[in-house]
Image: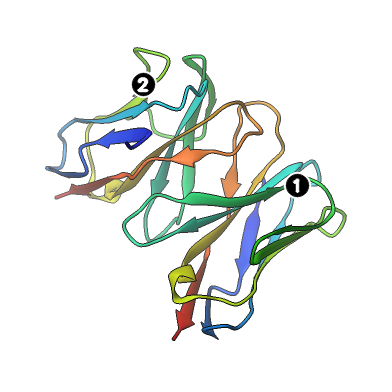
């Protein structure tokens, strides 16, 4: 049974600072990884996907994947108050029933 | 225009009753999902459907029954409601299994 764990549970960074979110997973067959963001009162929205080892940058967001270490991270550069939200790591093996397992989330607060 | 519609937005039910949560997606996706979010389990996978066929069921209780009358519809019937069923239920859709999932705005269910 896939286990996806995120750390820290909550994080406060100053506006303009760097936020670093971590995620570990347990299934070595995992192939597909996403970071989702959820603002209060809304559904989660995908920020970015990463499927290959290494870094992937999209604007202020950089995801890093190391499948051998069962680890994926998200770094947010120049954090803005609008980045304050709940962030989820999501992992899939891509087989069977399309199941995606979400981590427990990191709550990010960017203080102005 | 919203691409994934969930109805109703809020729902209050009494213990033992039955409710149906509605989900329609207009993204042209073939796969649809249900998730549940509560304080205890931040985002919990419930079901996945592809081309109106059940792909995966991670819900232990038969009180939860998805219903797909059309390719872009996946409703969720919940019978014999319990206070523990109180949560926000999200519908999502994707092109195929490894594609990014898009979430609806959720239905917030409160069982008294």
Instruction: Answer with left or right where residue A60 lies relative to residue A72.
Output: left
Q: Nearer the viewer, residue A82 or B23?
A: A82
- Residue A104 showing in the rendered view: no
Distance Cα–Cα, label 2 vs label 1: 31 Å
Q: Which residue: 18% across, 30% down?
A: B18
SS category of the residue bearing label 1? loop
Q: Which residue: 33% across, 45% down?
A: B105
Residue B16 location in percent, x, y? 16, 36
Residue A102 location in percent, x, y? 56, 51
Q: Chain of mark 2?
A: B
Residue bearing the label numbered 2: B73
Q: Chain of mark 1?
A: A
Q: Nearer the viewer, residue A43 or B21?
A: A43
Q: Single out the mark in the foreground, 2 or 1.
A: 2
Instruction: Answer with left or right where residue B2 lies relative to residue B28.
Output: left
Q: Is residue B49 above or below residue B58?
A: above
Residue B57 location in percent, x, y? 50, 29
Instruction: Answer with left or right where residue A8 lies relative to residue B81.
Output: right
Q: Identify the disc placed on residue A17.
A: none
Residue density around tag 1, few if under 14, some if 14–19, many if 20 or more, within 10 Å: some
Residue A51 location in percent, x, y? 76, 45
SS category of the residue bearing label 2? loop
Instruction: Answer with left or right where residue A55 lies relative to residue B28.
Output: right
Quadrant in the rendering for residue A19: bottom right
Q: Nearer the viewer, residue A30 or A13?
A: A13
Q: Identify the disc placed on residue A27.
A: 1
- Residue B33 showing in the rendered view: yes
Q: Is residue A52 above or below residue B23?
A: below
């Amino acid at each position: 049974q896939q286990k996806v764990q995120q750390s820290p549970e909550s994080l406060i960074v100053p506006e303009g600072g760097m936020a670093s979110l971590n995620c570990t997973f347990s299934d070595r067959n995992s192939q597909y990884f996403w970071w989702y963001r959820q603002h209060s009162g809304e559904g989660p929205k995908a920020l970015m996907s990463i499927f290959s080892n290494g870094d992937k940058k999209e604007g202020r967001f950089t995801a890093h994947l190391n499948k051998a270490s069962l680890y994926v991270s998200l770094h947010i550069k120049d954090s803005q108050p609008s980045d304050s939200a709940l962030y989820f790591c999501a992992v899939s093996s891509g087989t069977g029933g399309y199941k995606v397992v979400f981590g427990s989330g990191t709550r990010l607060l960017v203080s102005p | 225009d919203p691409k994934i519609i969930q109805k109703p937005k809020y729902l209050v039910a009494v213990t033992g009753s039955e409710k149906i949560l509605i989900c329609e997606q207009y993204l042209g996706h073939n796969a649809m999902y249900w998730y549940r979010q509560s304080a205890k389990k931040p985002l919990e996978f419930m079901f996945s459907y592809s081309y109106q066929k059940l792909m995966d069921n991670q819900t232990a209780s038969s009180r939860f029954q998805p219903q797909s009358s059309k390719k872009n519809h996946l409703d969720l019937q919940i019978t014999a409601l319990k206070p523990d069923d109180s949560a926000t239920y999200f519908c999502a859709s994707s092109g195929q299994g490894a594609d990014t999932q898009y979430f609806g705005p959720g239905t917030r269910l409160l069982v008294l």
